[in-house]
Image (spheres, rainbow, N blue to C red):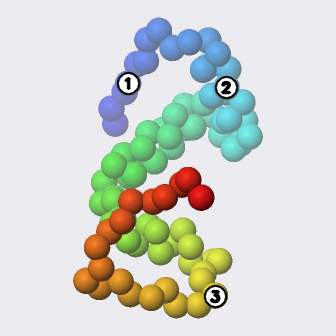
Amino acid sequence: MAQLVVRQLEEDVKVRLGRRAARHGVSMEEEVREILRDAVKREERSPSKLGSRIAARFAKGGLTRDLPELHGQLARPADFKK
């Protein structure tokens, strides 16, 4: 297994890392390994498309009625003066 040395880590970060490890019931070393694993996993996942992210965000609340389709209509700038 590889080893990694992190130099010049701020004392504040070390203290908070220790607290986080204690909350999870693991050593600081294991906590750092888990953080690094998680960071690499996130990088490997392909980002979801915008439409999918919007749909997921509003999936719980939903709409009370269907929205009309606006095919063939020109976009108009919003009028905030009203």
Q: Is residue 76 above or below residue 36?
A: below
Marks 3 and 1, Cα distance to the nearest angstrom?
A: 54 Å
Residue sitting nearer the eye, 1 or 38: 38
Mark whose residue sits in front, 2 or 3: 3
Q: Which mark is residue 16?
A: 2
Residue positioned most to the front: 82
Q: Residue at x 50, y 72 (%)?
A: 56
Q: Secondary structure at mark 1?
A: loop
Q: What amino acid type is highlighted by mark number 1?
A: Leu
- Mark 2 and mark 1: span between their CA atoms? 19 Å
Give the answer, above or below, for where 68 lies relative to 75: below
Which residue is the site of mark 1? 4
- Tell me if mark 3 has few (under 14), some (14-19) or many (20+) residues whose alpha carbon lies within 10 angstroms of its own: few
Q: Amino acid at mark 2?
A: Arg
Numbered badge on residue 64: 3
Decide which of tag 3 and tag 1 comes sooner along the chain: 1
Q: Position of residue 72 (x, y in %)?
A: 25, 83
Vertical relation: 78 (above or below) 34:
below
Viewer-proximal residue among 63 and 33: 63
Few, some or many residues within 10 Å of mark 2 (<14, 14–19, 20+): few
Q: Is residue 71 left or right of residue 16?
A: left
Q: Residue at x 66, y 36 (%)?
A: 21
Q: Nearer the viewer, residue 69 or 1?
A: 69
Residue at 32% of width from left, 68% of height from top? 75
Q: Alpha-carbon neighbours of circle 1 within 10 Å: few (<14), some, or many (≥20)?
A: few
Which structural element holds mark 2? helix
The C terminus: image quadrant:
bottom right
Q: Nearer the viewer, residue 2 or 77?
A: 77
